[in-house]
Image (cartoon, rainbow, N blue to C red):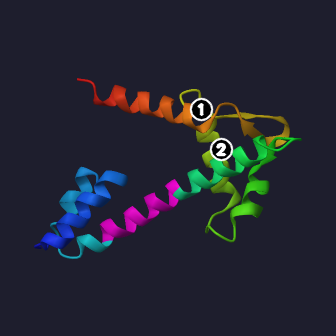
Amino acid sequence: MFLTTEQMAQMVLEHVDLPYTPEDLAELTRVGGALEVEQRRRAKQREQDLLGSVLRELRAEAERDQAEYITARDIYRTVRDDLETTEEEILRVLVFLQHPFVAAVREGAKGSFALAARPDVAALRLSSIAGALKTK
């Protein structure tokens, strides 16, 4: 399958925000492969959007005068109109953000969570992990 220069240019721009995997690039050479790659990219973008939404809700709660721990259900109720998701997906994001490598959230009582660090600090931790992957 041949790609137009416009398609290639668009792919380069997309790669900056959400990098293609080697499998994606190989798939693009197959007939019909572009559709499969696009579906995977939409799913990855959706996951990134969910991660951002969860962090925004945690930050909004942390900035309240009477900040409290919030649950996946609390977040779900806030984002469900804007994002197609489930409480289970939100909980998976919270557990990921709680991992010691990220340490962006801490768990309270009964499955409730709060920011443990500013999101930019968590981003720096993730960036350092990415840097470790790049080393030779």
Quadrant containing the C terminus is top left
Give the magenta-colored segment's residue range.
36-48
User: Residue 1's quadrant in the figure?
Assistant: bottom left
User: Residue 3's quadrant in the figure?
Assistant: bottom left
Image disc number at residue 76: none
Give, as a three-letter code, the residue at label 2.
Leu
Secondary element at image label 1: loop
Q: How far from the left and from the top, in percent, is residue 4?
A: 13, 74
Main secondary structure of the magenta stretch: helix
Give, as a three-letter code, the residue at label 1.
His
- Badge 2 or badge 1: first in the primary sequence: 2
Image disc number at residue 94: 2
Between 24 and 119, which is closer to the camera in this rendering?
119
Q: Residue tagged by mark 1?
A: 99
Secondary element at image label 2: helix
Instruction: Examine the rendering and report whether any part of residue 36 can be seen.
Output: yes
Position of 69 with respect to 131 (left or right) is: right
Q: How far from the left and from the top, in percent, is residue 26?
A: 18, 59
Check residue 38 for magenta coloring: yes
Position of 24 with respect to 17 (left or right) is: left
Identity of the residue drawn at 38% across and 33% down: 130
Q: How far from the left and from the top, in percent, is residue 12?
A: 23, 58
Identity of the residue drawn at 62% across and 55% down: 53
